[in-house]
Amino acid sequence: MAAPIRCSCVRLGYNIKRLIGNSRLITEVARNDKTFFRFRTSSRYYSSRASDPRVSRSKWTTKFVGIGLVTATAVGIGYGFRNTTVHDAVDNGIPDIKPSRQIRIPTDKSGMKLVLYQYQTCPFCCKVRALLDYYGLSYDVVEVNSVVRSEIKWSQYKKVPILVFQAEGKEEQIQLNDSSVVMSILYTYLLDPSKPVPLIRSFYPQVEVFDEVKKKEVKDFSNKYAIMYQEDASDGQTADQQMEERKWRSWTDKTLVHMLSPNVYRTPSEAIQAFKYFSEVGEWEHVFSFPMRIFVIYTGATAMYFLGKVLKKRYNLNNDVRVSLYNECDVWMKAIGKDRKFLGGHKPNLADLSVYGVLSSIEGCDAFKETLERTKIKPWYYRMKSAVKRHEGHGILSVMNTTPGKSR
């Protein structure tokens, strides 16, 4: 425990220096949040109010408020660490962690035990949940503390989502990583449950590839958008349809998802709104102590505001980032065309589920509401939402799995 604590303290010291240096922004964030901080502030930084002597304040007042917020968040970290339980692997296995909630679908007869380690509003986690819900699969959710991530300390893979799979009647628990790989493996298994998941997983080895945007070697997975069809297992897609599905699944990960952060955290007030939405839908009151929750919301909003600016530049977004988001949604709708309900035709395919999952992650934010108003994506989105909530894929799987000659 000593090493992680030392490391956390170093990170805390670094973050405090960054936050003090940016105390003006923190003050602006707080000033825009009418429900938590009941004060006003101004300085020469706010040019529209600097000329009003009734509200002018010294730069030290602004700095003081910023430092005060930093102190509060530091206290939040302290309480958070004090109340944090580290879940280590048991006998080199996966620990038994009490789920944050359990999703039970009465029609699910698969016998699988699935545990999803996630952040509720992570777009990649939302992709996996969209697939699980659409196909009517029961699963447990372990909400990961996004600050200390104690729930996944046992895993060498430190990102979410992580899906732990256990087949009916089997004791072995199998860890599946990367949202697109999880979707491909699980869909392959649903098509043909006679193929064991460890075998299917071996078709998606981890490799190092050069990222053209980041200009460095990064870890990725081979074949991540491919479904491993067997001669006796097919969902009826043609080769062209399979290639189209892969193309748009890749586009979701490499293009669409990068539109979100610059839009959701476009301004300090929008960043605060986003994190409050995340807190609400993620039920952070059950995951964090109150001081830690305040720390995550306000410090997270500040950090992500700056990150949004970095991502805007990295991915060459329009100066008005909303335009970039609108344009990509229009690109998606053009791909579907006027004659199809979904990219998959009369039913969603994995690309539909991926795009829906990514967009659903920001459903409570202004960027999402404005996108529905300014683009043609709204009818498709709500068709998807209905299909996912009603678990319409369950009936489709039942038909496929009773096809004559199909192995089980």
Image (cartoon, rainbow, N blue to C red):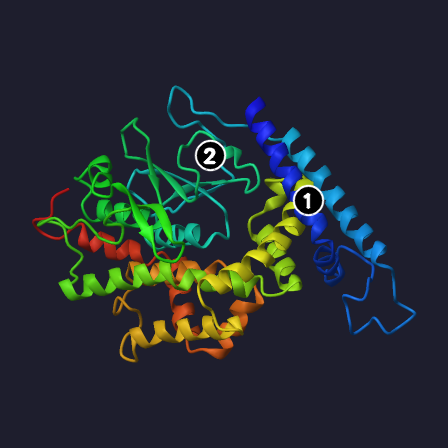
Residue extending furthest toward the top: 91
Reading the image, the residue beneath label 1 is 17
Reading the image, the residue beneath label 2 is 152
Of residues 402 and 302, the one drawn nearer to the viewer in this rendering: 302
Q: Nearer the viewer, mark 2 or mark 1?
A: 1
Tell me the residue at 54%/43% (across/down): 146
Of residues 77 and 16, the one drawn nearer to the viewer in this rendering: 16
Q: Is residue 67 visible?
A: yes
* Residue 394 in picture, x, y percent from top left: 29, 53
Q: Is residue 185 left or right of residue 214?
A: left
Nearest to N terminus: mark 2 or mark 1: 1
Q: Are marks 2 and 1 in contact (CB under 8 Å)?
A: no
Q: Quadrant of residue 267?
A: bottom right
Residue 312 lies, with reference to residue 139, above or below; the image says below
* Residue 56 in picture, x, y percent from top left: 88, 66
Tell me the residue at 86%/74% (across/down): 51
Amino acid type of the residue that numbered disc 2 sits on in the rendered structure: Ile
The CA distance from mark 2 to mark 1 is 28 Å
Q: Is residue 136 left or right of residue 407?
A: right
Of residues 43 and 240, the one drawn nearer to the viewer in this rendering: 43
Tell me the residue at 57%/41% (across/down): 147
Q: Quadrant of the C terminus?
A: top left
Which structural element holds mark 2?
helix
Residue 67 lies, with reference to residue 99, above or below; the image says below
Which structural element holds mark 1?
helix
Amino acid type of the residue that numbered disc 1 sits on in the rendered structure: Lys
Residue 128 lies, with reference to residue 202, above or below; the image says below
* Residue 318 in picture, x, y percent from top left: 49, 73
Tell me the residue at 41%/68% (across/down): 381
Residue extending furthest toward the front: 215
Near mark 1 (Cα within 10 A), the count class, few <14, some 14-19 or many ≥20, is: some
